[in-house]
Image: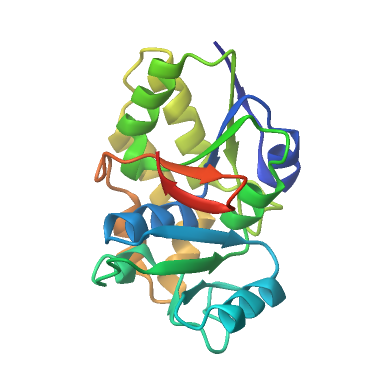
Amino acid sequence: MEIKIRSCLEGARQAEGLTVIIDVFRSSNTIITCLGQGADYVIPVGKLERAYQLKKDNPGYLLAGERNSQPPEGFDFSNSPSHVSSLNLRHQKVILTTSAGTQGIVNATDADEILIGSFANAHAIVNYINKKQPGIVTLAPMGFASSEKAEEDEQCAWYLKERLLGHQPDFEEISNKIRQSKGADRLTRIGRQDDLEFALQVDLYTMVPRYDKRKQHIIKA
């Protein structure tokens, strides 16, 4: 099993084999939490206009996400896993558009299979990949606005790679590095310290979100 790390939007476009899209702050965790709170599926969308159109065509769907870390006008909720964890999303369909994570999902067109990963479901991701034993695994840390490497995503990609290689990294050391990052500072400045703390928990969920290219939905694998 060959493990590659390909960063940001260009990395997602280069992704091959089984691919894990990683956006720790925050869309990976928002997707995981939406499914954990009972959503039937999440529809990842790149363009804001497409998200509004889907909502217009499906008024019963929930519209979620962010631009510049804030929810756009008319959205039902923001890209906040901490907030989502308090919602009852049973049988709901969620449209999600973000600046990084969903961009990676819709642009990883050459990947054989697309999963969504974070620290929150690291053990489940590693188990899933180890059972499938694909020839190539691409770990795609999306970074800030999908254009600039982010410490939290790079550290998560490295953590998953080490776990796949049978090692057990020191998560406390990783967490300390992330807390000193620009991403952590940004979350604090916009008043989302709760999302920072949420994102730095390991193995909260046992699920593996998987993107169905045909239906363009993210569901539990």
Q: Where residue 167 sits: x, y (%)?
A: 35, 15
Q: Report whether residue 26 is seen.
A: no
Q: Report whether residue 167 is seen.
A: yes
Q: Where residue 150 sits: x, y (%)?
A: 57, 48
Q: Where residue 177 sits: x, y (%)?
A: 42, 42
**Which image quadrant: the N terminus?**
top right
Position of residue 137 relative to residue 157, above or below, is: above
Position of residue 119 relative to residue 190, above or below, is: above
Side of 153 where 54 appears, left or right: right
Location of residue 212 by image quarter: top right
**Which image quadrant: the C terminus?**
top left
User: How many discs appear?
Assistant: 0
- Foreground residue among 137 and 172: 137
> Which colouring convention does the figure follow?
rainbow
Q: Residue at x 63, y 29 (%)?
A: 112
Location of residue 193 by image quarter: bottom left
Q: Residue at x 59, y 13 (%)?
A: 135
Position of residue 166 relative to residue 148, above or below, is: above
Position of residue 88 relative to residue 167, above or below, is: below
- Foreground residue among 204 and 93: 93
Q: Residue at x 42, y 56 (%)?
A: 31
- Foreground residue among 95 and 98: 95
Q: Where residue 40 sits: x, y (%)?
A: 37, 59
